[in-house]
Amino acid sequence: MKIEIISVQSKKDLKSFILFPKKIYSGDPHWVPHLWEDRVKILDKKKNPFFQHADAEYFLALRNDQIVGRIAAIENKLHNETHHDKVGFFGFFECINDKEVAAELFKKAAEWLKVRGFDEVRGPANPSSNDEYGLLIEGFGDSPRLLMTYNPEYYMELIESFGFKKAKDLYAFKIDADKMMATEKLVRGCEIAQKRSGLVIKGLDMKYFDTELEKVKKVYNQAWAPNYGFIPMTDAEIEFMAADLKMLIDPELVVFGEINGEVVGFALVLPDYNVIFKEMKGNLYPFGFLKLFTKKKLLKWARVITLGIIPGYQKRGLDAVFYMDIMRRAAKRGIYHGEASWILEDNDMMVKGAALMGGELYKKYRIYSKSLI
């Protein structure tokens, strides 16, 4: 039966694009539906500041007038300026278990990128490495933590059957507060590192949110610049992200590290609201909004979304000091499990640090790449 690939052109098409995953994940107990409002904001080229330096085309695959897949082809000019390459991206990929359908989607995305002069396609990126990134390849028996991806296991075969190869794996570590804080050597090492450096860790002051956000801007792009696939976040993107996450923030779990009054590090840690989002089934209103507040105290997991230290203060054991401080703060709120993710497989400092803290490598994600030449 013929497969037709169409470009999303109307609000009706976009609605179909956003809602299609419900067909794929129906009955999957681990899937967490995205909030409708969240997907609309991310895909809106007029409202999402990502599109001030990027472009994208959204595609739907149809068979007998039924939607059977979707994909986005993404041009990220800031990535290309940063890395001096000609890499385009695919993202928001969802598909029935059919290699022919997947191949037609990938062909269409590749054609769109080749016309724009790209010689490689990489992904999945939804829509960039500063957002949901990578395909889950290990750890399918568990729901994703907040802002992490989730997909059927057969997606690996669909992607690889089109000729995609591994570019890089991303790790997620499970860290237990009791186990970490019971490690005397680690506790003592953190105390020594903190005393030697003079590091002072403070929680976020919501009364001065805009001022605190300036600290994030100062640290973020410096700390992560050397990493694979790094794309600097513009001020507009950081402000967009902050506005989106503001109501989810626990100010005691968003921390800044200062030495002699200078901000040298930052960690964004959020309770795992995915437990609540799963119950909301993608709907914030009319009652989902209330669940965010009434059930927040029941959450037992948090995710360390970002933890960065600016160059010049790295490799001094300060990352472990941050983790120890965060886990103590979380434990006071009844949160005893944390996920540190995502961490590059070859980021030896972070991988060894997670192991030192008793972290368990319990999930893996993959970035795929394919030549367009």
Image (cartoon, rainbow, N blue to C red):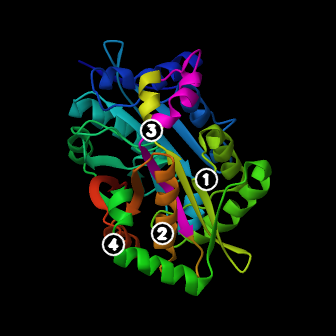
Magenta includes 293? yes
Q: Assess disc 1: are there few (<14), some (14-19) or many (≥20) residues with their C-alpha within 10 Å of its C-alpha.
A: some
**Which amino acid type corresponds to the residue marked 1 in the rendered image?**
Glu
Q: Which residue is mark 4?
A: 356
- Residue ID for mark 3: 299
Q: Amino acid at mark 4?
A: Leu
Q: Residues within 10 Å of mark 3 (few under 14, many from 20)?
A: some
Q: Position of residue 347 (x, y in %)?
A: 38, 72
Give the secondary structure at mark 1.
loop
Distance from disc 4 to disc 1, alpha carbons, whole Å, reads: 24 Å
* 190 relative to 235 in the view: left or right: left
Residue 252: image tag: 1
Q: Are marks 4 and 2 in contact (CB under 8 Å)?
A: no
Q: Earlier in the sequence, mark 1 or mark 2?
A: 2
Q: Which picture quadrant has residue 199? A: bottom right
- In magenta segment, residue 298: yes
How far separated are the C-alphas under marks 3 and 4? 25 Å
- Which label lies toward us, 4 or 2? 4
Residue that sits furthest to the top in the current view? 65
Mark 2 Cα shell of 10 Å, populated few (<14), some (14-19), many (≥20): few
In front here: 223 or 355?
355
Please report whichever mark, 3 or 4, sits nearer to the chain's N-terminal start.
3
Relative to residue 76, is residue 32 depicted above or below? above
Look at the image and tell me in which quarter the N terminus lies. Answer: top left
